[in-house]
């Protein structure tokens, strides 16, 4: 019989169901344990459970998952910050009072405050004091500022009502008439640029995330080919005796799925710990000028629940990509062998 004709017969033997055990098993010679009751040797896996390449791949997957999780957290933080900026545009505006020779800034602040409170659509008015203004400029100009010697404007922040439309036209006219040197700034142009920059950062983070996943896929491809090369004799024998490609691929898939889960969980857990540590470090610096400026620009450093859910999903995606890539690589290699 030729080898080509023997392969289907061997495949049928591999796929055939096991025969039911006899009701009365024969006794071994010498009165020992019945032959059918003796424990059978379990065949070892095609892919060894612990190899240097497997540990290396686990470390690579953990690093990629960690970096991808950090990218995901940064994208989530930037996206929520941009949304907060867009909300601030419609609920807050600022009046600047420029200093001039002979102008009493404190009296001008009081006049501006009265005019703002009398304007429709203004829910609250908060003038910044000299100390608060100096604190805002402290990260750039240093501590101990003498504001009287510097032409620094005073700020009056207006909280807008969500129910009543803001009458900015009448307020601008009142400021021109009764408070010279005071200008209304709605931050629209500046915030539009910040929002555009934040959206660009978000898309850049998405591209980086895709590239990291692609690098993980390539690493799995090379690791799978290396595992098949090191076990080439076993794979060829199984392939020759008629073992189905799906059986061989499932052996590699289950092994690489475990590697992907280990590496993904390790990298995702490290990223979550990093998020907590970063938040704790910034919370300890609350009250300093630098942290206050970061809060004013980016908001509080709080990774939202969507980021943590995204990290968990990312771990599952990495494990699925690892298993699926391994299976596809095995199929391709087996077709080349056949």
Image (cartoon, rainbow, N blue to C red):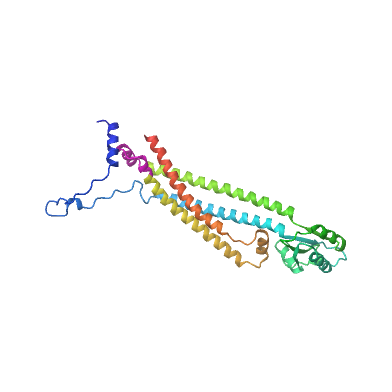
Left or right of residue 14: residue 162: right
Identify whether 75 is placed above or below 227. below
Picture residue at 74% right of the left edge, 54% below the top? 188
Check the image and name the residue furthest to the left: 30
Instruction: Report the quarter where the C terminus lies.
Output: top left
**Frontmost residue, 207 versus 50:** 207
Residue 39 covered by magenta stretch = no
Instruction: Report the quarter where the N terminus lies.
Output: top left
Picture residue at 40% right of the left edge, 38% below the top? 333
- Write down the quadrant of residue 157 in the picture: bottom right
Look at the magenta stretch and give its main secondary structure: helix
Residue 232 covered by magenta stretch = yes
Left or right of residue 310: residue 103: right
Left or right of residue 212: residue 197: right
Picture residue at 31% right of the left edge, 38% below the top? 242
- Give the percent coordinates (x, y) of residue 94: 76, 61
- Give the percent coordinates (x, y) of residue 217: 48, 45
- Write down the quadrant of residue 171 in the picture: bottom right
Q: Give the total of numbered labels.
A: 0
Left or right of residue 90: residue 47: left
- Give the percent coordinates (x, y) of residue 311: 52, 55
- Write down the quadrant of residue 138 in the picture: bottom right
Span shown in magenta? 230-249
């Amino acid at each position: 019989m030729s080898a080509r004709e023997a392969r289907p017969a061997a495949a049928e033997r591999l796929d055939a169901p096991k025969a039911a055990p006899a009701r009365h098993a024969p006794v071994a010679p010498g009165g020992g344990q019945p032959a059918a009751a003796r424990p059978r040797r379990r065949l070892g896996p095609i892919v060894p459970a612990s190899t240097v390449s497997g540990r290396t791949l686990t470390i690579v997957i953990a690093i990629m998952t960690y970096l991808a999780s950090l990218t995901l957290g940064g994208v989530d933080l930037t996206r929520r910050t941009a949304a907060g900026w867009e909300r601030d545009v419609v609920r807050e505006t600022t009046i600047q009072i420029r200093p001039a020779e002979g102008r009493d800034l404190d009296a001008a602040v009081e006049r501006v405050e009265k005019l703002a409170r009398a304007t429709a659509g203004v829910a609250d008015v908060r003038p910044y004091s000299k100390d608060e203004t100096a604190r805002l400029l402290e990260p750039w100009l240093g501590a101990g500022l003498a504001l009287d010697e510097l032409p620094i404007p005073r700020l009056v922040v207006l909280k807008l009502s969500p129910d009543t439309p803001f009458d900015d036209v009448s307020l601008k006219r009142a400021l021109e008439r009764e408070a010279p040197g005071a200008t209304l700034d709605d931050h629209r142009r500046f915030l539009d640029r910040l929002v555009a920059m934040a959206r660009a950062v978000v898309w850049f983070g998405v591209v980086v995330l895709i590239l990291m996943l692609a690098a993980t896929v390539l690493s799995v491809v090379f690791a799978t080919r290396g595992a098949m090369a090191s076990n080439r004799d076993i794979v060829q024998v199984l392939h020759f005796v008629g073992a189905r490609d799906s059986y061989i691929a499932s052996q590699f898939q289950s092994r690489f799925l475990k590697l992907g889960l280990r590496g993904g969980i390790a990298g995702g857990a490290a990223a979550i710990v990093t998020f907590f540590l970063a938040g704790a470090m910034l919370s300890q610096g609350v009250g300093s000028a630098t942290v206050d400026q970061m809060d004013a620009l980016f908001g509080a450093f709080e990774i939202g629940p969507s980021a943590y859910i995204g990290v968990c999903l990312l771990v599952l995606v990495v494990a699925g990509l690892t298993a699926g890539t391994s299976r596809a690589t095995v199929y391709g290699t087996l077709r080349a062998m056949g």
